[in-house]
Amino acid sequence: MGHLKASTRERLILALDVESVEEAEGLVDLLGDYVGAFKVGSQLYTAHGPKVVEVIQGKGGRVFLDLKFHDIPSTVAAAAAEAVKLGVFMFNLHASGGLEMMRKAIEAAKKAAGRAKREKPLVVAVTVLTSLDEVALGEELGVGRPLRDHVIHLAKMAHGAGLDGVVASPQEIEDIRAACGQEFLIVTPGVRPEWATLGDQKRVMTPGEAIAAGADYIVVGRPILQAPDPVEAARRILKEMAL
Ligand code: C5P
């Protein structure tokens, strides 16, 4: 496997879908030894900004900044440079923003990393949001090709732009792997252990299945956050991933 492939713990990303810095802090203290990174999304970041990222990193946690940048190339490039300055381990953007937007973002991230003398964060693209189905894609967004083809088209574009990988649902892993090669990172949410409830996730795989299908990182929220014993839940997930 490629140079960026990570150990089992490093491959588990916890979605910090909580409201307060205190809750986030508590989870980092509790689960820091069991997960490789903490995902900060638009809720937590809109409420608390860079402070929450700094708090997590201050405790030794790595951060996946899940803000899905999608804007004109110069704006996304500037945001990418800021994400590098924040010191995050991974951030994402929408492939639908186009090739130039992605190229400029990577270029800016590399430059900012050079200036800050730190490693460039992993930059991954969102292809088609899993909340969109083929009807919405066609009728609302005017994309004529089948959803699966459009996902692959956007993944290839992200690969061509020099991104490190994509965020993809479990069902998309094999096609993306085939289209973009072994080195391209696949970050997979929508993962559910057999023993967890589905919540609003419909098309799921277990952690073991997602890793076997070729995911590099899996993003898990509620199966850990809402477990009676989150540490035990994280341990069980790591065990399944390692099988
Ligand atoms: O609680 P759960 O494990 O479903 O959380 C998964 C995380 O991944 C959430 O933060 C959710 O927003 C995110 N996500 C997802 N499905 C996608 C893309 C992102 O569940 N297709």
Image (tube, rainbow, N blue to C red):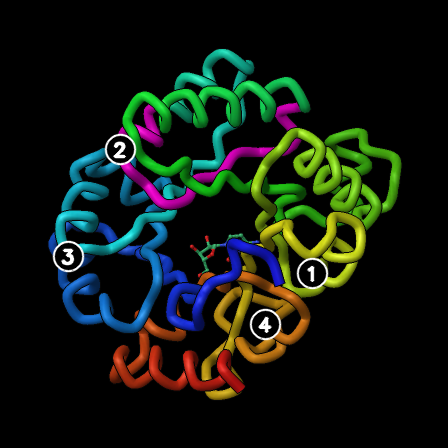
Identify the residue at horizontal 34%, vertical 83% (top origin).
Answer: 235
- What residue does disc 1 label? 173
Chain-order first, disc 1 or disc 3: 3
Which sits earlier in the primary sequence, circle 2 or circle 1? 2
- Residue on which disc 2 sits: 86
Task: Of the two numbered discs 4 and 2 on the same chain, state the one appearing first in sequence.
Answer: 2
Q: Earlier in the sequence, mark 3 or mark 2?
A: 3
Where does the magenta region start and end?
82-98
Q: Which residue is mark 3?
A: 25
Tag 1 and tag 4, C-beta contact below 8 Å: no
Q: Classify mark 4 as within 8 Å of ligand 1 or not, answering yes or no.
A: no
Q: Earlier in the sequence, mark 4 or mark 3?
A: 3
Q: Position of residue 230 (x, y in %)?
A: 27, 78
Measured from the top left, where is residue 150 in percent x and y?
79, 41
In space, the residues marked 1 and 4 are separated at their CA atoms by 10 Å
- Please, what secondary structure does the residue beneath circle 4 have? helix
Cα–Cα gap, marks 4 and 3: 28 Å
Q: In this view of the protein, which residue sits in the foreground, 144 or 57?
A: 57
Say which residue label 4 marks: 211
Please name whichever residue, 4 or 71, is drawn nearer the observer in this view of the structure: 4
Residue lying at the far right in this picture: please name it: 145
Q: Nearer the viewer, mark 1 or mark 3?
A: 1
Label ID, residue 208:
none
- Label 3, secondary structure: give it: helix
